[in-house]
Amino acid sequence: MKSIVLVGPMGVGKSTIGRLLATSLRRDFYDTDKLIEDRAGADISWIFDIEGEEGFRQRESNTLSELCQQDDLVIATGGGIIVREDNRKLLNKYGRVVYLTASISQLVRRTDKDKKRPLLQVDDPKQKIIELLESRDPLYREVADLIVETDGKTPKQVAESLA
Ligand code: S3P
């Protein structure tokens, strides 16, 4: 069966929902950020510090291409997976891509005081979230087979709606 790939902004719940969905479908679950960290033996902030965002994006593209060799998975991606055109092309051919959305206030709430996300270590994280979403929303839509609003739903409810 086709893999299910969750895309969407930071804080929308891709990893939590993906894990629940994989359990209920009895499929293997992969989180691209977690795989990148495991392989690098370092966390994402460290990779951004040492290799820059480009270094991280290259690792992210490599990880995605590798995962896309297999079917039957549930994959949670990092919020910027759609930035590179090659990744979007790959996602357009592979799996069932679900764009998870949430209101800005929910995204801000769920990423509040987050030290793990280098792109949000700025003076005004809310403004950054707004800007990223403005530029990336069309890209998420370009790859999405399905768009699911998460506001007002628990991760379990969202996962059940996708199972
Ligand atoms: C990023 C999102 C993060 C992580 C990295 C960059 C982004 O993943 O990949 O910090 O560019 O939006 P989450 O969406 O899981 O937070």
Image (spheres, rainbow, N blue to C red):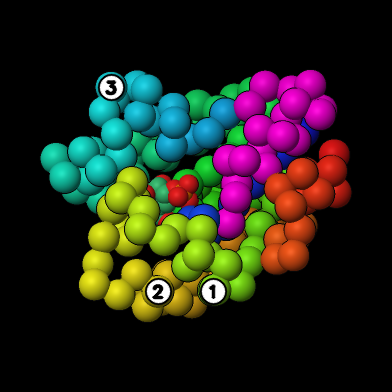
Q: Is residue 136 magenta?
A: no
Q: Please give the residue where the numbered disc 2 appears in the rendered image.
A: 126
Report x, y in % for residue 21. 75, 35
Picture residue at 85% right of the left edge, 39% below the top:
163
Residue that label 1 marks: 104
Question: Magenta part of the protein: which range?
Answer: 12-29
Query: On the rendered image, what quadrant is the N terminus found in?
Result: top right
Which residue corresponds to mark 3? 41
Q: Amino acid at mark 1?
A: Ile
In this rendered view, identify the residue nearer to me: 88 or 40: 40
Q: Is mark 2 within 8 Å of ligand 1?
A: no
Q: Which amino acid type is shown beneath numbered disc 3?
A: Gly
Question: On the image, which quarter does residue 93 sit in?
Answer: top right
Discs 2, 1 touching: Cβ within 8 Å = yes
Q: Is residue 13 magenta?
A: yes
Q: Identify the amino acid type marked 2.
A: Lys
Considering only order in the chain, which callout, 3 or 2, is on the residue closer to the N terminus?
3
C-alpha gap between disc 2 and disc 1: 8 Å
Label 3 SS: loop
Q: Looking at the image, tell me whether mark 2 or mark 1 is earlier in sequence order.
A: 1
